Image (cartoon, rainbow, N blue to C red):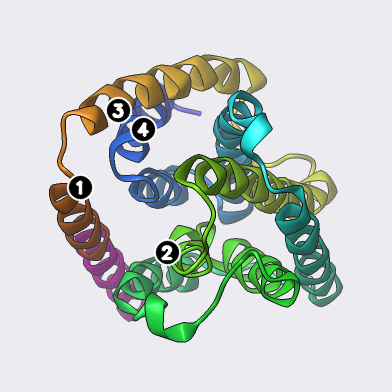
C-alpha cells in the first residue's frame, strides 16, 4: 500500500468511528466507501469486517448483561443461511455494483418501519433479520438501515436494543470476514492491508467511538433523528453518483 492509502485508511478508521459514535450507521457506510476506493473489493469487505467486528464486539462486551440472546440466536440462523448461499454462489460484487448497493441502502431509512410490523423479539422475525441483513451486508458491506427496521416496534429497553444490535452485528461482520476471507485466501491475500496497519486502525476506531459518544450526549433526540436520516441519505446520493460514473466509464 502507498503511504497516502495507509494514511487515508487510518484517518477513515478514526473519523468514521466518530461518526458512528454520533449517528450510528453512518460511519460504517462511509468507511466501506473509502475502503472500496483504495482497496480491491474483496479486501475492502474483509478489512471493513475486521474493523467493524472489533468495534461491535467491544460494544457487545460492555453491554453483555443487556443482550437478548434469543434474538441473537434466531438472527444467527438466518445469518448462517445467507452466508451459505453467498458461498455456494461464489458471489462477489464488482466495484460499480458495490457503490450502487451502498448508494441505495441509506434510502431504507425512509421506509415506514413502524408500519411494517417487524419485531426482532419475535423468533421468526429474528431469523428473517439475520437472513436479510446479513444478505445485504454481504452485498453492500453495510446494512444498518435495514437492521433498524426490525427494532422500531420492539418493546426492549434502549440498553437491550443497543446491546442486542451490537451482538447481531458481530455475527454479520464475522460472516462477511469469513465469506470474503475464503476468496482472499484463494488469491493469496491480494490487496489486504498489512496486519500492522489494522493494529493501528483498531485503537483509532475505539478512540473515535468514545469521542463520538460524548458529542451524542450533547445532542437532542429530535436533532439526532433529523440529522441521521439526512446525513445517510446525502452519503447515499454521493455513492449513486460514483456508481453512475463507474458504469459510464466501463
Secondary element at tag 4: helix
Q: Is residue 223 left or right of residue 45?
A: left
Q: Is residue 66 left or right of residue 224?
A: right
Q: Secondary structure at mark 1?
A: helix
- Is residue 250 something one can see in this rendering? no
Judging by the rendered image, the residue that carries numbered circle 2 is: 145
Q: CA distance from mark 4 to mark 1?
A: 26 Å
Q: Is residue 145 magenta?
A: no
Mark 4–mark 2 distance (CA, rounded to whole Å): 20 Å
The quadrant the C terminus occupies is: bottom left
Q: Residue 216 falls in which quadrant of the image?
A: top left
Residue assigned mark 3: 212
Percent across and percent down for residue 138 are 64, 63
Q: Is residue 145 above or below residue 173?
A: below
- Circle 4 or circle 2, nearest the eye: 2
Residue position for label 4: 12
- Foreground mark, 3 or 1, reads 1
Amino acid at each position: 500500500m502507498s503511504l497516502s492509502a495507509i494514511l487515508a485508511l487510518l484517518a477513515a478508521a478514526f473519523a468514521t468511528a466518530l461518526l458512528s459514535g454520533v449517528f450510528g450507521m453512518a460511519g460504517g457506510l462511509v468507511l466501506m466507501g473509502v475502503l472500496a476506493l483504495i482497496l480491491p473489493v474483496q479486501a475492502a469487505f474483509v478489512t471493513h469486517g475486521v474493523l467493524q467486528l472489533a468495534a461491535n464486539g467491544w460494544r457487545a462486551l460492555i453491554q453483555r448483561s443487556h443482550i437478548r440472546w434469543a434474538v441473537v440466536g434466531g438472527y444467527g440462523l438466518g445469518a448462517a443461511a445467507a452466508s451459505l448461499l453467498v458461498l455456494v454462489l461464489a458471489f462477489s460484487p464488482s466495484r460499480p455494483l458495490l457503490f450502487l448497493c451502498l448508494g441505495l441502502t441509506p434510502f431504507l431509512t425512509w421506509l415506514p418501519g413502524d408500519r411494517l410490523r417487524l419485531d426482532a423479539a419475535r423468533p421468526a422475525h429474528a431469523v428473517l433479520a439475520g437472513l436479510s441483513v446479513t444478505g445485504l451486508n454481504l452485498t453492500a458491506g453495510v446494512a444498518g438501515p435495514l437492521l433498524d427496521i426490525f427494532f422500531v416496534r420492539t418493546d426492549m429497553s434502549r440498553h437491550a436494543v443497543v446491546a442486542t444490535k451490537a451482538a447481531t452485528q458481530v455475527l454479520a461482520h464475522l460472516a462477511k470476514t469469513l465469506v470474503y476471507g475464503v476468496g482472499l485466501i484463494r488469491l493469496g491475500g491480494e490487496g489486504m492491508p498489512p496486519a500492522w496497519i489494522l493494529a493501528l486502525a483498531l485503537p483509532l476506531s475505539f478512540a473515535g467511538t468514545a469521542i463520538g459518544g460524548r458529542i451524542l450526549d450533547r445532542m437532542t433526540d429530535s436533532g439526532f433523528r433529523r440529522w441521521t436520516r439526512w446525513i445517510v441519505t446525502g452519503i447515499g446520493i454521493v455513492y449513486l453518483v460514483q456508481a453512475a460514473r463507474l458504469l459510464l466509464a466501463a
